[in-house]
Amino acid sequence: MSLGFKNSLFFGQFNTVQLGSSKSRSQKHRILSIEPVRTSVLDGYIVPRNIKGKIDNLGKVKLNKDFVLRSKSVLTVDKEVDVDGNGGLGRERSNYDAIVIGSGIGGLVAATQLAVKGAKVLVLEKYVIPGGSSGYYERDGYTFDVGSSVMFGFSDKGNLNLITQALAAVGCEMEVIPDPTTVHFHLPNDLSVQVHREYIDFISELAAKFPHEKDGILKFYGECWKIFNALNSLELKSLEEPIYLFGQFFQKPLECLTLAYYLPQNAGDIARKYIKDPQLLSFIDAECFIVSTVNALQTPMINAAMVLCDRHFGGINYPVGGVGGIAKSLSKGLVDQGSEILYRANVTNIILEHGKAVGVRLSDGREFFGKTIISNATRWDTFGKLLKGETLPKEEENFQKVYVKAPSFLSIHMGVKAEVLPPDTDCHHFVLEDDWARLEEPYGSIFLSIPTILDSSLAPEGHHILHIFTTSSIEDWEGLSTKDYEAKKKVAADEIISRLEKKLFPGIRSSIAFMEYMESWQVGSPKTHRRYLARDKGTYGPMPRRTPKGLLGMPFNTTAVDGLYCVGDSCFPGQGVIAVAFSGVMCAHRVAADIGIEKKSPVLDAALLRLLGWLRTLA
């Protein structure tokens, strides 16, 4: 069974790499232009215009492969972040325009966007480094990503390259490595599908495996492109700010109406309009599960379209040195703009005065005050812990009626000898061996990242990093003694490794060079994620209680508490790096309007917020 790269050059851009080699396939780029996405029609189907060619016969493609990431010099962030913070920060009331609780990607994007507009921002981070779920840690010469290594938003074109734009806004750029395969699926009935960077290559492979569904495949993914192209043509700011919203509507009415049409729809319903084959529908469930940890019927179509198309339009691009460099770069850029970030700053309370959020209190008793408070904690943590004792606003009650906490993950980080992996191994794998019904069950499916396939500098020479994770509920880990807890982690990890050894990499167990069961970061349970990421039950975001009406029920950044805003994966548009970055951009724009940096219309604001509140009740 082939496991990845073809033994040839990828369109003259990607060189194959022998595993264990010290060379990495890197490419430096920065945002050079913002171009609206245009579409063309191949045999009547919507596709990106930059794909010039047509599907002549099933599995046969003619294509001018002329897309190139344009190279420019970059600023490499190679200095360690000052983790000691500034213990002398003042307590003056309204000293800050915004105080951000948490330094996840959503919080950092909101903070840096405000800082470049001239706001004075303070970011408070509980841990000793920034990034949250997009952080990193180091052990014995290995640099491990805390969360996913599948990085969206890092391209040099379009409007959805939000990470590139966020870095550029504060004068930072990062060297990135294009990933030729987003993910390699290993599924029941020996179904193997590689999601190639090039859209035509992916569609051709999928159609070759389901020739009777070729028309349905093109129509479903064509609808995804309609949504993506509409999103990618708009200037992305706050959907809660009417001046911007009406301006975009008058400039791009068709695109805005397209998004409005799909807002209440889910990917599974649209897939079923065109596709009948149960196994192909199950594959689309797996595609959406990676996006949202739920199946296609519960995944909003807009969320699915963003990810299923951006992986081909901008592609997956891995930052040299690891995902943690994103947060380090944004933090550096924030400080360069005259704002501040304080580490080891555990916020325990949001301070209210006359119903308005005016400050925060830390676990050590220090207090900081600002005009606005932005919480990068989950909405459950924000209203259940940071505002403990306060009456839960009706809007948050409604949110918790529609959404529950998604399960957490069991994560395994380990180093292996390079020779155990075949030379054509892909960077990312999704494994579900025998039963489609296990897709959403705890420990049912496995996601595997091997970032050293792209960047060998993350591990000692001749070794690779394997980052393995599978869904797991915190209830499965509570009430255990320390001895039983550590033993359970070992048993769970052994079972996962055995499955990978059987399905993908024979001999992998004997090649393990680094793995410490007693270190919680090496085998991390949901309790580990709760402890280090300060997320209730270790959750990775909201999950609908029942089939949702698309994104209608998803709250935006404003809250019922005056002066308090939320940002991150429990806000519109949901989970994923590109989604939380979008949330950060939207939040910064709304806050900037409220503190007088951006234009504002109080009358229109009130009307729009009432309308959005009413729409959420329809979910």
Image (cartoon, grey):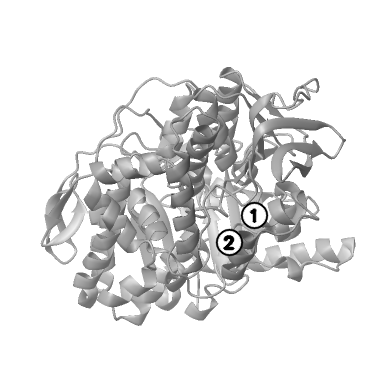
Position of the N terminus, as image quadrant, is bottom left
- Of residues 351 and 83, the one nearer the viewer is 351
> Which numbered marker is on residue 542?
2
Which residue is located at x 48 percent, y 40 percent? 602
Asked if residue 81 can be seen in this view, the reply is no
- Of residues 92 and 12, the one nearer the viewer is 92
Kind of residue sitting beneath label 1: Arg
Picture coordinates of residue 343, whole percent (x, y): 74, 31
Q: Are marks 2 and 1 in contact (CB under 8 Å)?
A: yes
Which residue is located at x 78 percent, y 50 percent? 519
Of mark 2 and mark 1, the one earlier in the sequence is 1
Which residue is located at x 31 percent, y 52 percent? 228
Picture coordinates of residue 562, whole percent (x, y): 63, 44
Q: Is 592 placed left or right of 366 in the picture? A: left
Asked if residue 250 can be seen in this view, the reply is yes
Using the image, determine if residue 560 lies above or below residue 543: above
Q: Residues within 10 Å of mark 1 (few under 14, many from 20)?
A: many
- Residue highlighted by disc 1: 379
Q: Secondary structure at mark 2?
A: strand
Picture coordinates of residue 434, whole percent (x, y): 50, 78
Q: Secondary structure at mark 1?
A: helix
Tell me which corner region of the image, top left, top right, bottom left or bottom right, holds residue 31: top left
Instruction: Please identify, in this view, whether the residue under mark 2 or under mark 1 is nearer the observer.
Output: 1
For this orientation, the residue located farthest to the front is 603
- CA separation in Å, label 2 and label 1: 9 Å
